[in-house]
Image (cartoon, grey):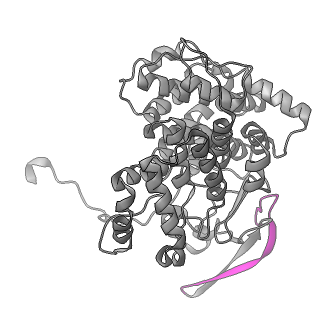
Amino acid sequence: MNNKPSNIKDVGTATLNYGNQQYKFPVFGGTIGPNVVDIRKLYEKADIFTYDPGFTSTASCESDLTFIDGDQGVLLYRGYPIEQLAKHSNFLEVCHLLLYGELPTPAKMAEFDHTITFHTMVHEQLGFLFRGFRRDAHPMAVMVGVVGALSAFYHDSTDITDQKQREIASHRLIAKMPTIAAMAFKYSIGQPFVYPLNKLGYTENFMRMCFAVPCDEYKVNPVLAKALDTIFILHADHEQNASTSTVRLAGSSGANPFACIAAGIACLWGPAHGGANEAALNMLREIGTIDRVPEYVKKAKDKNDPFRLMGFGHRVYKNYDPRAKVMREQCYAVLDELGMKDDPLLKTALELERIALQDEYFVERKLYPNIDFYSGITLKALGFPTDMFTALFALARTVGWVAQWKEMVEDPQQKIGRPRQIYTGPTKRDYIPLEKR
């Protein structure tokens, strides 16, 4: 038998002709998406490996969490289109969906909401850990350290073989990440930490922890809260991207969940991944004013110019990013609510968007504005500095990481990750003593 994963169907075989031999390998199919060739026996049978830098043609696991069709511009969470979830759902309900596979009943939602809400406090001693960082430390550096340190505070939820401990750790991470991110923000601007308030919703509570001060009451603007909640939904999971794969790889060794999520945060920090919206806003600052947009559009078209438009196109989506359509609506709602349509930076962004949607060069290459373009503008309008953008991404993606980690731990096919390589270094040679070299 070919040791087929339980939820995958046989769809045929693939034949490899190599040397003077012919080798057959099973081909499996999921519910939707491309079929896969099972090459687990390739090395054993043919004494060769596959070569796939970046693993862009390699399925490393079976998952029923998220599906992406980049050619058609489709993103599904557990089968639900992202557009429907963003319009009708809220982030905490999406968290339940990703963790447990179904949208909750009213009773289940109330129970889940209560559980998450009452886990939002962090151990008081964590405050001392924050004070060990320099004031100008990047919030992502702080979050990597603090989230990794959670395993030193919550020993009762680090045994990954215990299903109940896995669930408690999952709840704790989803609940405490907003508190940790808000503390990182407050620390960076020299303001006192604000404790969670249980009567508020998940996103409203986070906004209060970020923007409230002890000397004034803080009232959450529902339009702004909806926009931020939508950003969280759109970033909650995105299949086997770099940070998610990092979480799974760390988890495959049996590492505790807090360490795994810290590893995911570290990977997300890269400008090619979670830092893309920060890079997009920095690009808009470089352009500066609306009258300079044509100059930079020309630079973007010049093959010999290293300048690239950040926030346009996507590695996975070869059509319009479905998240960008949703984010565009929320971006405009925020700008209208705050009366910021005349902000020079935002006017520059909107002019760049207009040109990119009409210019033949961008349309032919499908270089549409992506989610990072609109989320960067929105987060700036909400009052977050650019170095907080990736921290907010990490907050939102935590539920996806946790759900993927949980799925990986519970998968009977799971093995410790061990990619192969093509070795191109020296062949065997003998050591020469130092005095004879």
- Indicate the quadrant containing the N terminus: top left, top right, bottom left or bottom right: bottom right
Where residue 135 appears, as percent x and y from the top left, is: 37, 24
- Residue placed most toward the observer, 381 or 67: 381
> Is 237 drawn above or below residue 423 in the view shown?
above
Where residue 110 appears, as percent x and y from the top left, is: 85, 29
Residue at the image point whose x is 15% and y is 49% from the top: 433
Where residue 44 appears, as percent x and y from the top left, is: 60, 68
Q: Which residues are magenta?
A: 2-19
Q: Number of labelled discs?
A: 0
Q: Is residue 201 magenta?
A: no
- Residue placed most toward the observer, 224 or 272: 224
Relative to residue 149, is residue 7 drawn left or right? right
Where residue 96 appears, as percent x and y from the top left, is: 78, 39
> Is 164 drawn above or below residue 341 in the view shown?
above
Residue at the image point whose x is 75% and y is 40% from the top: 90
Q: In the figure, residue 201 lies in which quadrant?
A: top right
Residue at the image point whose x is 80% and y is 47% from the top: 88
- Residue placed most toward the observer, 436 or 57: 57
- Indicate the quadrant containing the C terminus: top left, top right, bottom left or bottom right: bottom left
Q: In the figure, residue 105 lies in which quadrant?
A: top right
Farthest residue in the left direction? 435
- Residue placed most toward the observer, 45 or 197: 197
Q: In the rendered image, is residue 115 in sight?
A: yes
